[in-house]
Image: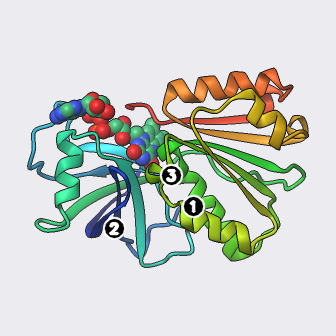
Amino acid sequence: MAVYKTKVICVSEIAKGTFEVRLKRPKDFFFEAGQYIQLKIPKLKYADYKGNSRVFSLASSPNEKNFLSVAFRNTQSGYKKTLIEMDKGKKEVLIEGPYGFFTLPKKKDKNLVFIAGGIGITPFLSMIKLCHESKNGYKITLVYCNKDKESSAYLEELEKIAKENKNFSLICHFGRLNVDLIKKNLPNIKSDFCYIVGPPAMMDAAEQILLSVGVEKDNILKEGFVGY
Ligand SMILES: Cc1cc2nc3c(=O)[nH]c(=O)nc-3n(C[C@H](O)[C@H](O)[C@H](O)COP(=O)(O)OP(=O)(O)OC[C@H]3O[C@@H](n4cnc5c(N)ncnc54)[C@H](O)[C@@H]3O)c2cc1C
């Protein structure tokens, strides 16, 4: 897999304890919405027993030619503390990828339901922005679960897209996903195709809920943010 040398453009706090890092997009770096990269920091400022690289889904759309963005909760790991401070100091990083098959389906015969737990929003944001910009006909409902409004990254941007695009609906929920929320808002979910992203425990719980309302296992695609 190709390795690209690039730079941090800026770092911003986009929600409570949640940071977005923008990287200069190498000219020859191409990816599909929903894919992830490995992001390596050549020299860590703060020690990290897990080393100097992590994988992150790309939150930017493939249409954004000048930058790539990733977002994460600040857990105070040495890696993340270093990355957040790269805004001010040394800016060079290495990216490897893109990786993964958590992408839009080839066929458009089913409505898509995206279920995001917290920072699991990142690959969905990339897909939603792409669909919005290119008006490619996918019909998407996002169920976005967070502890509270303050920790909901990209919420304003998603609300704006929902207002402008009749093919995109947003269900924003504060608290854990539950079966009543699905039954009330998505009565026809059995015939939809569902994607789930989040920490492994959330992802497994969400899958059980979908199975319990009759979604078939073959119609569920999952991406676990292992490490949270
Ligand atoms: C396909 C894929 C895509 C992913 N995409 C994303 C993404 O878009 N965004 C994202 O945020 N994550 C993503 N992840 C997860 C990511 O790779 C990391 O594993 C995750 O962000 C946790 O990394 P970390 O450095 O915070 O914690 P780790 O170093 O893995 O530590 C785990 C926990 O230990 C604690 N800890 C570690 N070091 C310290 C310390 N020095 N002091 C106090 N506590 C500490 C923290 O509570 C932390 O949550 C993805 C994973 C996969 C597999």
What residue is shown at x 51% (from left), y 53% (from top)? 122
Where residue 6 sits in the image (x, y, percent)? 28, 67
Contact, CB < 8 Å: mark 2 with mark 1? no
**Which of 51/70 is in front?**
70
Q: Which residue is mark 1?
A: 126
Question: Horizontal placement of 210 versus 30: left or right?
Answer: right
Tag 2's secondary structure? strand
What residue is shown at x 61% (from left), y 63% (from top)? 158
What residue is shown at x 63% (from left), y 59% (from top)? 127
Q: Using the image, tell me which numbered label, if any, was put on residue 23.
A: 2
Q: Amino acid at mark 2?
A: Leu
Badge 2: residue crowd in 10 Å (few <14, some 14–19, many ≥20)? many
The answer to which of marks 2 and 3 sits earlier in the sequence is: 2
Ligand 1 has an atom within 8 Å of the beta carbon of the residue at disc 2: no
Single out the mark in the foreground, 1 or 3: 3
The answer to which of marks 1 and 3 sits earlier in the sequence is: 1
**Which of 178/225 is in front?**
178
Can residue 177 be spotted in the picture? yes
Distance between the alpha carbons at the discs numbered 2 and 1: 15 Å
What residue is shown at x 22% (from left), y 54% (from top)? 83
Distance between the alpha carbons at the discs numbered 1 and 3: 21 Å
Where residue 145 sits in the image (x, y, percent)? 58, 42
Q: Which residue is mark 3?
A: 149
| Quarter of the render that holds ligand 1 | top left
Can residue 50 be spotted in the picture? no
**Which of 104/193 is in front?**
193
Q: Amino acid at mark 1?
A: Ser
